[in-house]
Structure formats: structure tokens, C-alpha cells
Image (cartoon, helix red, strand yellow):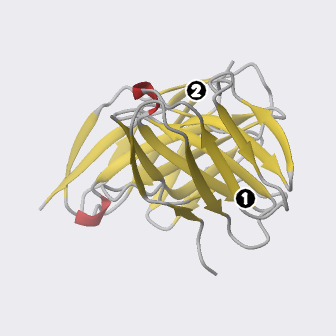
Amino acid sequence: AQKITQTQPGMFVQEKEAVTLDCTYDTSDQSYGLFWYKQPSSGEMIFLIYQGSYDEQNATEGRYSLNFQKARKSANLVISASQLGDSAMYFCAMRAGSARQLTFGSGTQLTVLP
Amino acid sequence: DTGVSQDPRHKITKRGQNVTFRCDPISEHNRLYWYRQTLGQGPEFLTYFQNEAQLEKSRLLSDRFSAERPKGSFSTLEIQRTEQGDSAMYLCASSLPGAEEQYFGPGTRLTVT
């Protein structure tokens, strides 16, 4: 079975600073993918970034980067130069093996302070 | 390209009634997923279609739940004899063949009174 753990229920960051959201995962599959989604108060899940288990380099998408440490089974999201619009719930998710569905963590509520 | 759409956005029903939700995926996305999200939690997988074939069903999906995707385009999720515990946000997502990322719709919020 797959499991995603997000240990930070809430995080605060000052506007324009960087913030790291933690995510650890557990799976017995060698092939897996890790995802981060953003869910603003409007409710829609927005795809941010993806990292495959065999990718040697950390994924980056604009201000988002995924700090992938395979040995530690962690896939932390780094948001650089935070903006007020980054305030939202952030979910880490995993797809493992031949399964197509995603397993989500419980999320981290990020608040960006002006 | 329009995103995933879901209808209705909100549904209030009385316990024991049947409800049906619709999801229209992004054009050319052959994979379609249903998830359920309760307050303060991450989404939980319910079921998955590739084209018209339902390939995976979660153990969360009781006999009262049924999903279809008859022509491999839109999908419907029906809940029979609703219970208060069914109150949740029902999310639909779709993805392209060979692609990893799933794109979510705005969800249908169900309230069972």
C-alpha cells in the first residue's frame, strides 16, 4: 500500500520569501511518481509539478521546485519568491507501480503574509 | 482548450434519495478518474476509466455507488440511497494517454440532510 505523509498542517511565509512544504512517502514499488497540487479556497485542484522515481534531476516549474531525496523517501515542494496568491492548501500525491490512481496526503495550508 | 467540467457544482439532497453527477473531461483525454474529498482531507480515489472501460474501483466504493462512461467521453457517478456520510466534494480528473499529470474539475459538493 502507498502512503503520503504531510506533517505540517499549516505554514506561514512572508511575501517574496521562499518556503518549503514537507512530504514523505512510502511504497514498495520501484517505479512511482510524485505530484504536488494546489487547492485554493475556490476548491479546484491545480497541478503544479511532477517527479518520476527514475528522474535524476529535481523537477522545476517556474517558481516551484521539487526537492526529491529518494533514500529519505521525501519529495518536498519549494516555492520561491512567495506571492499573496500562493495562499492555498497544498497536497502531495503519489502514483505507484501499475496503478493509475493518485494517493494524496492530508495537505498543508500555506498562508503568505504581506 | 476547456478544462474538466462537472455538473452540478452543488447538490443538496435528503437522505435516501438518489443523485447523479456528470463529468466532462478535457477533449482527447482518454483516462477519467473520480475522487471524493471530505473536509480537511486529501482526495480519495473512487474509480478510474480508460476510454469506456472501468479498470479500477476502490474498496471505498460501496454497492450504492456506480459509475459509467458509456461512449468514452463524459462520465456519470450515481449514488443510490444517499447517507449523511456521503456528504463530500466529488472530484473528477482526466489525463492524456501516456501522461502522468491529472487535471481536475471544480468538483460537485454534495450535502445530504
**Residue placed most toward the observer, B72 or B99:** B72
Give the mark count.
2
Secondary structure category for the residue under label 2: strand
Residue at the farthest bottom position: B1
In the rendered view, does B71 fall on the left or right side of A44?
right
**Quadrant where the image shows the C terminus of chain A:** bottom left
Residue at the image position 61 percent from the left and 57 percent from the top? B22
Q: Secondary structure at mark 1?
A: strand
For badge 2, the amino acid type reads: Tyr
Nearer the observer, A36 or B49 = B49
Q: Position of residue B12 (x, y in %)?
A: 37, 46
Rendering coords of residue A10 (x, y %) = 25, 36
Which of the image's four quarters has the N terminus of chain A?
A: top right
Q: Chain of mark 2?
A: A
Mark 1 belongs to which amino acid? Answer: Ser
What residue is drawn where x is 52% and y is 58%? Answer: A48
Q: Relative to B93, does residue A5 appear above or below in the rendering? A: above
Camera-side residue of A113 and B11? B11
Mark 1 and mark 2: Cα distance apart in space: 23 Å
Position of A19 relative to A3 (above/below): below
Q: Where in the figure is residue B62, as x and y percent of width and height?
A: 65, 24
Q: Residues within 10 Å of mark 2 (few under 14, many from 20)?
A: many
Circle 2 is placed at which residue position? A25
Up-down: is A108 above or below A40? Answer: above
What numbered label is drawn on residue B95? 1
Number of the front mark, 1 or 2: 1
Can I make out residue A17 in this image?
Answer: yes
Question: Residue shown at 33%/34% (left/top)?
Answer: B113
| Above/below status of B111 relative to B30 | above
